[in-house]
Image (cartoon, coloured by chain):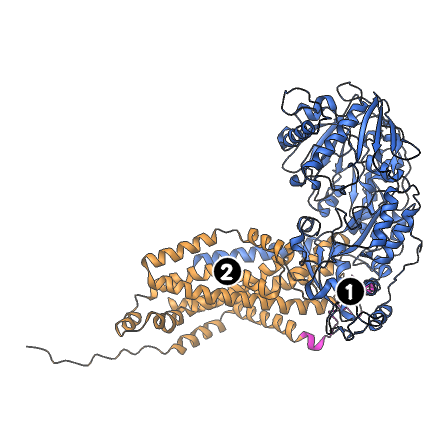
Chain colours: A orange, B blue
């Protein structure tokens, strides 16, 4: 006796937005995350909307107004070129955030695809790709950058590329780890059975489902990149006049620390700290929100 | 994702550390005037206190210049900085620390030379000096030293940075006419002062102990050029062994006031002890002199503050620290170093955007010099903070050969004059835009030879990453240029990179990487600041390939002519023709503990980095 063929019962998967909404709901109840997000919004608004309200000349050096302490007309004083420090912070902040974001996007995009390919392929390909990552991770970043800085001159794009070129390794490892757990899920197997190409599996199934990890990683990457930009600027591989970034400003300020030009250090140092703190708090909250979903 | 948690903890920790670091650094400052800053250090304290015998002092070496070589003439390939230059092996004449004389006769190994009427025979009588092994310093030693210098140059012209092919020591021979008399025969007569400045670079080395080509080998006849070359090769090879600096018996034979006791090859720091046989001036009261190497000026300042340094120089960026240093028991004296000038060196062979054609026009250089606000730079708290002097010539401050224009700048700060110069020569000036050549051609009111229509003035300025005032003054210049529609792209480079790569005479391949460079100071010979080797067409240190027939002629006259007054004419012509763009000269600060004393001149000569610890003593 043979059983009559029956229509398989349709499995109703929860719509993706529900997960997103749940994550947002969890975020709402994460006070530190909200504080981080709010702080980040304030920093972004300061950098991008600030110049609309606080107009300063950030291109013409003013010798006789150089290194003025905070006072009328210059609430945060002037720097050693006579630029208004408040305006300089806005200008430097824009560049630092842009570089941070660019580097993070570059690193995450490349690292995600790289990790997904490695994780899905498995075997020799996976082994080769990940050993390559190990090798690159062993290259000392600062050493490499110092060599580059001796020969080349930095601009915002090259800085973003250099930082991104070293940051994608972590993204690749994270995504690869996530893909190793996802690739054996039913919906991936189903897609394979239905003849989906590897490309489709990666871009339509694996990466969207690893998006939680990726988003969290992007946030950390931006924070890291802002710090790295600051460090590079501090080491002399920053941007040159007329462009500026927070790291270069801090480096310049520290040069004059013995002259007690404190206003060249505290404000920009504070902004670097606040921005990184905000991004870290936000990333932490995002990780918690996405992580619970994964649980 | 535990590693993420770990990263987060690390970041938060770093954040907290940063916040605490910021908070502990303290904050207080006033917008004080910079006009009277120089008053704090312009007078040199008188020699005071009762001398005591013994004691050790610590001397700060110039940051970034850690010694790595001991033989007095390091080959170019060694990129060497010599240990205690002049303290272990004296030159025939010791350079003067004052700007108005070429040499310090008292501290020299010989009396001033006697020159024949045709100036082709120079007789030098040696004073009574001994080597540290008791042997007298003789004329043979001087002949040996000249032969070894020639051997070095025979191997490579780059082995002596003061060399111009065809000039000293080319065509110069030396003969020991007596034990204490050496006679130089010159194929070409030299100006006496210029020759003296060359003899001040001739370090006297022991002819008996060093005239060997292998350890324990026989003494060679160094007058044979082949032998001299072999000796030079051996000595430079020995000098590569840094671990043996303090132990190799070769280096213990000295004629200067000190011997090397120890050398730290990791840092470049070293210690000297007195040479008991030294018979020159000075009581040699100190037991030991420790020279400490530094990599940054701020580290030097910190060591002064900690009280661990006895004497040294200090970057003028720290002029605000003078009061604190005085409170901590230090004397501070400052002034512009003799024969020093600071400038933007121009590369006349950079072809990017037709820069070579544009900068060849004197009116363009004059316009650019008009954009440098020297008075403003000196006063600015962001550049010199009052610790600098305006300067418009290669002679530097208080030179015995001042330019004919005196203190009146030939091209003072005047942006309007700069604009007029450009518009009068066919340029359409676009303030804060792009100034372009509208009227090409070679007529008086046209842009100049080979400058095409539509050409813009755009070039790269390589700026040294230290000291701080270099970057600040370059940015100020760039900003002024921008207002006139001139684009200057600043690239910051390390000094080492610039020294190795930015000079057409030794690195022609990188000529298009830099159109101007600011590496800080350039020192000419104090007492006779000739621009020979720097601005003559064939000069070995003519970094930017400057060439001007009139200047060549004048340099020739000041080098070979009898009349030293022509040097003022040379300086005037060069300074008006602008092979470089002049900046103010920052003052060099000399700092020493008030428990250390000695002749005032011995501290003044530190402006020229001439150390004289044999004259110093600690006070009771």
* Residue A246, magenta (yes or no): no
* Residue A64, magenta (yes or no): yes
Q: Distance between the residues labelled 2 and 1?
A: 36 Å
The residue segment tinted magenta is: A50-75
Q: In this view, does B104 lie above or below B316?
A: above
- Mostly what secondary structure, the magenta segment? loop
Q: Quadrant of the C terminus of chain B?
A: top right
Q: Is B343 left, or right, of B229 in this rendering?
A: right
Q: Is residue A130 above or below residue B240?
A: below
State the residue in front, B135 or B64.
Answer: B135
State the image quarter where residue B597 is shown: top right
Q: Is mark 2 on a helix, strand or loop?
A: helix
Q: Mark 2 lies on which chain?
A: A
Determine if residue A35 is in view. Answer: yes
Q: In which quarter of the image is the N terminus of chain B?
A: bottom left
Q: Position of residue B354 (x, y in %)?
A: 71, 65
State the residue in front, B112 or A39.
Answer: B112
Q: Is mark 1 on a helix, strand or loop?
A: loop
Q: Mark 1 lies on which chain?
A: A
Mark 1 sits on what residue?
A: A82
Q: Residue furthest top?
A: B134
State the residue in front, A13 or A81.
Answer: A81
Mark 2 sits on what residue?
A: A167
Q: Do the residues at discs 2 and 1 belong to one chain? A: yes
State the residue in front, B449 or B4.
Answer: B449
Q: Position of residue A184 (x, y in %)?
A: 30, 65
Q: Residue at x 70, y 55 (%)?
A: A254
* Lower position in the chain sequence, tag 2 or tag 1: 1
Q: Which residue is drawn at 93% across and 46% down?
A: B565
């Amino acid at each position: 006796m043979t059983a009559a063929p029956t229509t398989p019962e349709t499995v109703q998967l929860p719509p993706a937005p529900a997960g997103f909404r749940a994550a947002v709901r969890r975020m709402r109840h994460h006070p530190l995350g909200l504080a981080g997000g709010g702080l980040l919004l304030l920093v972004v608004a300061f950098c991008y909307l600030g110049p609309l309200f606080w107009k300063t000349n950030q291109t013409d050096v003013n010798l006789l107004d150089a290194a003025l302490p905070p006072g009328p007309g210059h609430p945060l004083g002037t720097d050693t070129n006579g630029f208004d420090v408040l305006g300089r912070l806005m200008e430097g902040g824009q560049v630092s955030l842009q570089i941070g974001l660019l580097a993070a996007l570059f690193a995450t995009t490349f690292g995600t695809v790289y990790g997904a390919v490695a994780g899905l392929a498995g075997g020799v390909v996976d082994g080769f790709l990940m050993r390559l990552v190990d090798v690159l991770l062993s290259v000392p970043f600062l050493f490499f950058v110092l060599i580059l800085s001796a020969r080349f001159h930095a601009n915002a794009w090259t800085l973003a590329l250099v930082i991104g070129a070293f940051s994608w390794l972590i993204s690749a490892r994270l995504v690869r780890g996530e893909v190793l757990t996802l690739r054996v899920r039913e919906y991936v197997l189903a897609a394979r059975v239905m003849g989906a190409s590897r490309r489709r599996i990666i871009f339509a199934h694996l990466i969207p489902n690893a998006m939680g990890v990726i988003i969290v990683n992007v946030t950390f990457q931006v924070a890291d990149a802002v710090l790295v930009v600051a460090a590079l600027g501090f080491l002399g591989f920053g941007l040159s006049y007329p462009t500026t970034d927070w790291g270069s400003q801090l480096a310049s300020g520290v040069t004059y620390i013995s002259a007690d030009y404190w206003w060249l250090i505290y404000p920009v140092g504070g902004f670097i700290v606040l921005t990184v703190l905000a991004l870290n708090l936000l990333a932490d909250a995002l990780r918690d929100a996405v992580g619970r979903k994964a649980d | 994702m535990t590693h993420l948690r770990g990263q987060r903890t690390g970041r938060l920790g770093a954040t907290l550390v940063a916040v605490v670091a910021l908070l502990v650094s303290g904050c207080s400052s006033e917008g004080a005037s910079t006009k009277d800053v120089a008053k704090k250090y312009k007078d040199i304290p008188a020699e005071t206190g009762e001398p005591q015998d013994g004691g050790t002092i610590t001397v700060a070496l110039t940051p970034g210049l850690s010694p790595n070589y001991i033989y007095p003439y390091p080959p170019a390939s060694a990129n060497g900085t010599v240990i205690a230059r002049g303290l272990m092996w004296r030159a025939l004449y010791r350079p003067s620390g004052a700007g108005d004389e070429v040499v310090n006769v008292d501290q020299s190994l010989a009396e001033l030379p006697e020159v024949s009427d045709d100036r082709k025979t120079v007789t030098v009588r040696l004073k009574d000096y001994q080597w540290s092994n008791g042997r007298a310093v003789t004329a043979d030693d001087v002949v040996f030293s000249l032969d070894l210098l020639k051997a070095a140059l025979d191997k490579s012209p780059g082995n002596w940075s003061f060399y111009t092919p065809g000039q000293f020591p080319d065509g110069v021979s030396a003969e020991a006419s007596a034990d204490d008399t050496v006679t130089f025969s010159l194929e070409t007569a030299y100006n006496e002062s210029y020759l003296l400045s060359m003899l001040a670079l001739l370090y006297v080395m022991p002819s008996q102990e060093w005239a060997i080509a292998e350890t324990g080998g026989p003494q060679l006849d160094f007058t044979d050029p082949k032998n001299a070359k072999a000796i030079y090769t051996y000595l430079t090879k020995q000098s590569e062994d840094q671990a043996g600096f303090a132990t190799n018996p070769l280096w213990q034979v000295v004629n200067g006031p000190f011997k090397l006791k120890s050398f730290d090859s990791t840092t470049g720091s070293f210690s000297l002890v007195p040479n008991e046989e030294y018979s020159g001036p000075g009581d040699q009261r100190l037991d030991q002199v420790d020279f400490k190497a530094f990599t940054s000026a701020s580290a030097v300042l910190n060591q002064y503050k900690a009280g661990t340094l006895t004497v040294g120089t200090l970057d003028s960026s720290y002029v605000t620290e003078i009061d604190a240093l005085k409170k901590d028991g230090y004397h501070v004296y400052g002034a512009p170093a003799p024969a020093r000038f600071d400038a933007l060196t121009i590369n006349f062979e950079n072809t990017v955007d037709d820069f070579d054609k544009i900068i060849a026009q004197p009116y363009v250089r004059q316009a650019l010099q008009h954009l440098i606000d020297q008075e403003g730079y000196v006063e600015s708290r962001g550049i010199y903070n009052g610790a600098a002097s305006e300067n418009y010539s290669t002679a530097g401050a208080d030179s015995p050969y001042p330019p004919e224009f005196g203190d009146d700048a030939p091209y003072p700060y005047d942006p309007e004059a700069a604009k007029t110069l450009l518009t009068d020569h066919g340029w359409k000036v676009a303030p804060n835009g792009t100034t372009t050549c509208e009227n090409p051609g070679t007529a008086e009111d046209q842009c100049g030879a080979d400058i095409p229509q539509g050409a813009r003035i755009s070039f790269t300025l390589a700026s040294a990453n230290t000291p701080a005032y270099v970057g600040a003054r370059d940015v100020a210049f760039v900003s002024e240029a921008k207002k006139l529609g001139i684009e200057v792209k600043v690239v910051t480079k390390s000094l080492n990179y610039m020294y190795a790569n930015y000079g057409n005479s030794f690195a022609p391949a990188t000529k298009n990487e830099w159109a101007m460079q600011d590496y800080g100071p350039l020192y000419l010979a104090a007492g006779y600041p000739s621009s020979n080797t720097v601005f003559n067409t064939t000069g070995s240190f003519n970094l930017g390939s400057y060439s001007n027939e009139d200047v060549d002629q004048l340099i020739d006259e000041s080098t070979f002519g009898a009349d030293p007054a022509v040097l003022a004419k040379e300086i005037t012509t060069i300074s008006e023709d602008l092979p470089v763009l002049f900046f103010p000269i920052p003052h060099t600060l000399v700092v020493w503990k008030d428990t250390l004393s000695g002749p005032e001149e011995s501290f003044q000569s530190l402006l020229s980095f001439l150390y004289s610890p044999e004259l110093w003593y600690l006070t009771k």
